[in-house]
Image (cartoon, grey):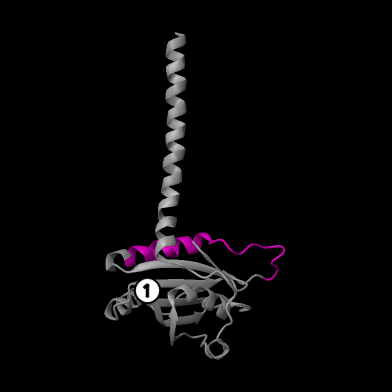
Amino acid sequence: MYFEILILIVVIGLSVIFYEIFKLLYYMRPNKIAHYYYKYRRKKFNNDKELKKHMNPKGGFYTIDKKLSETPELVASLLKYKKHEWIVLAFVKNDRVECIWANKGKDSKSVGLILSFDNIVRLAKDNNYTSILMFHNHPNPNPNMYNCTQPSDRDLETVNEWSNICKKSEVNLTVYICERGVSYKY
């Protein structure tokens, strides 16, 4: 009787340990891959004031030539102090971002892509872009009271939908939230 209880305790203990190990490995693997592929700078970036001034709220493509590592800070600086939500897509080829698309949301609480995402992916494939970086800001009226660095449920739904489209086309998708000039990958 005692022997059976002892075996049961050992089996349960091992199950819990293996569960925790697999859970850690599940979360570490994507982060490790992203860490090795994307090496981002984590310092403040002086934005391109002309580009920020000429960003069309109704949407537009803008030619830039930046290293992949500089892009999150550049876009976060472009979205800093925006009172409405904006979405920015950056197109990556050979560790360089050659162009971005940006459009404004209808209000301060949501933003949608004016172009269809299928057309965006087709554009990426036609121009041999390997990755699309998607950024959007969460305007924060009071940073001391609100934390806007986490994705909303709608953000997660959209990313799941878009990642399925990208997988079929063999285009990578990386998604960020920008708040107060800082980008957060999720």
Q: Which residues lie in the magenta part?
A: 141-166
In the displayed structure, 28 sits above or below 47; it is above
State which quadrant residue 133 falls in. bottom left
Residue 170 colored in magenta in the image: no
Residue at (27% x, 80% y) in the render: 126
Residue 27 in sight here? yes
Q: How many numbered marks have been drawn onto this rendered protein structure?
A: 1
Between 131 and 69, the one lying in front of the other is 69
Between 27 and 89, the one lying in front of the other is 27
Label 1 residue SS? helix
State which quadrant residue 8 falls in. top left
Percent position (x, y) of residue 57? 52, 85
State which quadrant residue 82 falls in. bottom right
Q: Which residue is mark 1?
A: 117
Between 116 and 3, the one lying in front of the other is 3
Q: Residue furthest top?
A: 1
Percent position (x, y) of residue 136? 52, 72
Q: Quadrant of the N terminus?
A: top left
In the image, 118: left or right of 135? left
Residue 105 in sight here? no
